[in-house]
Image: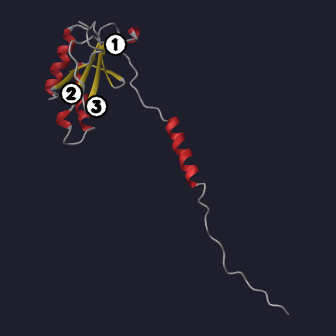
Amino acid sequence: MSKFKKKNKVSENIPTSALPDIIFMLLFFFMVTTVLRENEMLVEQKIPQATQLQKLEKKTLISYLYVGKPKNTAMYGTEPRIQANDVLINTSDIILWVNQEKDKLSEAERDMITISLKADREVKMGPISDIQFELREVDARRVLYASVGKVQN
């Protein structure tokens, strides 16, 4: 009788040649499908021009407040309103909003928060001074007044 040998060596190698292709396909998929979130503007914005401009270095420390007439005048009226992120707030809610924005920052950067005020050119100074007063109350003293571009002389 002939002897048959048993094969004890079983190949357990996992083919990894397609792994880089799969990783790049996933990377490409997430790059294409990811949407960078922008704020939906609930107030009208016609930003005034400035006579002097200065560029900021650290934009992560900036939080934006938009002031203007609401786009939906049937629901919110025609008086200027304040928009923080994607909601309309009152001047009394600014303190709470600034504290929430400071909580998003690290402990060392909380005192360096800058509030960018994008106000419509038609807004009177009354609501702007109310916002400034509330920002002083919460110790957010760095206020940036946004503008479109430099006025040509």
Mark 1 surroundings: few (<14), some (14-19) or many (≥20) residues within 10 A = some
The colour scheme used to paint the residues is: secondary structure
Residue 59: assigned label: 3
Kindly state the secondary structure of the residue where label 1 is placed: loop
Q: State the quadrant of the N terminus.
A: bottom right
Q: Quadrant of residue 87?
A: top left
Q: Quadrant of residue 6?
A: bottom right
Image point 55% across, 52% down: which residue? Answer: 20
Image position, residue 9 (x, y; %): 66, 78
- C-alpha distance separating marks 2 and 3: 21 Å
Q: Quadrant of residue 141?
A: top left
Left or right: 111 as drawn, with respect to 118: left
Mark 2 surroundings: few (<14), some (14-19) or many (≥20) residues within 10 A = some
Closer-to-camera residue (32/104): 32
Kindly state the secondary structure of the residue where label 3 is placed: helix
Image point 24% across, 25% down: which residue? Answer: 55
Q: State the quadrant of the C terminus.
A: top left
